[in-house]
Amino acid sequence: MRLIILLTISLFLFTAGCSKAPQGKAITLVNAAAVDALLLERVRAFAERELHVPVRAIENPKLAGKADFTAMEKAARRIKTDADVSLIVLSGVNGETRHLAVYSASGIAIINTQPLYTADAEIFARRIERQVMRAAAFTFGLEPTPDPFCVTRDYTSLEDLDSMGRNFSPPWQGRFTDEAGKRGLVPVDTAGEKKVVAPPAQ
């Protein structure tokens, strides 16, 4: 009997020790069976490098196959946590021609990968990168910029999308940084490490 009690206590302590530590705040990319693992990591690393804030990526194929953007956003709200400052879902939305739907009130954006797809893997990857940057800006309340080179500008076709830059104009980068700080995102350097501020000299 004592052995059973000891084993039970040991199992509890082991399980408690292995429990996940709370995650820091980040922009979270959710792959709903829309892209492969290599592209997901490429896009995650690109976004983190350009946004200068933590960006994590998770797989959640259960989000795939929703009827429309509204159903997708509702399902995404159920998995969003306090650590997910923005939740950006990559998924195909059948019968929908829009490339991106943003729900700034809930901090959720849905990127519809189906109309963005092309057999040219590099062009497809860059389209996804642009949409992630746009989603990050718009979930933070930024508006499209008139700057023709900024990734947030309005566009009218896939060819127009392909011709724009993949990052923010300097004023929009500054605005994004301000908004990120208000939301508790800790800046990271280009290597993905948290910036450490040295103490003042004595």
Image (cartoon, rainbow, N blue to C red):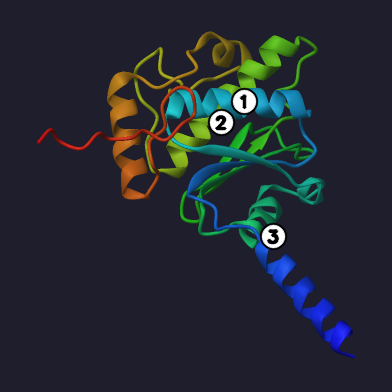
Query: Which residue corresponds to the image point at 63% horizontal and 31% vertical from the top-left?
Result: 99
Outermost residue toward the bottom in this view: 1
Label 1 belongs to which residue? 43
Binning the other alpha carbons within 10 Å of mark 3 as few (below 14), some (14 to 19) or many (20 upward) gives few
Residue at disc 1, secondary structure: helix
| Residue 134 relative to residue 72: left or right | left
Binning the other alpha carbons within 10 Å of mark 1 as few (below 14), some (14 to 19) or many (20 upward) gives many
Image quarter where the N terminus lies is bottom right
**Does residue 97 sit above or below 166 in this rendering?**
below
Distance from disc 3 to disc 2, alpha carbons, whole Å, reads 33 Å
Label 3 belongs to which residue? 18
**Most foreground residue, 17 or 34:** 17
Residue 149, quarter of the rendered image? top left
Of circles 3 and 1, the one toward us is: 3
**N-terminal-most mark, 3 or 2:** 3
Residue 111 coordinates in the image, percent (x, y): 64, 36
Label 2 belongs to which residue? 132
Residue 23 coordinates in the image, percent (x, y): 54, 53
Residue 174 coordinates in the image, percent (x, y): 28, 29
| Label of residue 138 in the image | none
Residue 93 coordinates in the image, percent (x, y): 75, 40
Q: Amino acid at mark 3?
A: Cys
Mark 2 and 1 residues: CB-CB less than 8 Å, in contact? yes
Q: Amino acid at mark 2?
A: Val
**Does residue 48 sit above or below 126 in this rendering?**
below
Query: Which residue corresponds to the image point at 51% horizontal and 59% vertical from the top-left?
Result: 82
Query: Which residue corresponds to the image point at 57% horizontal and 59% vertical from the top-left?
Result: 81
| Residue 65 relative to residue 146: left or right | right
**N-terminal-most mark, 2 or 1:** 1
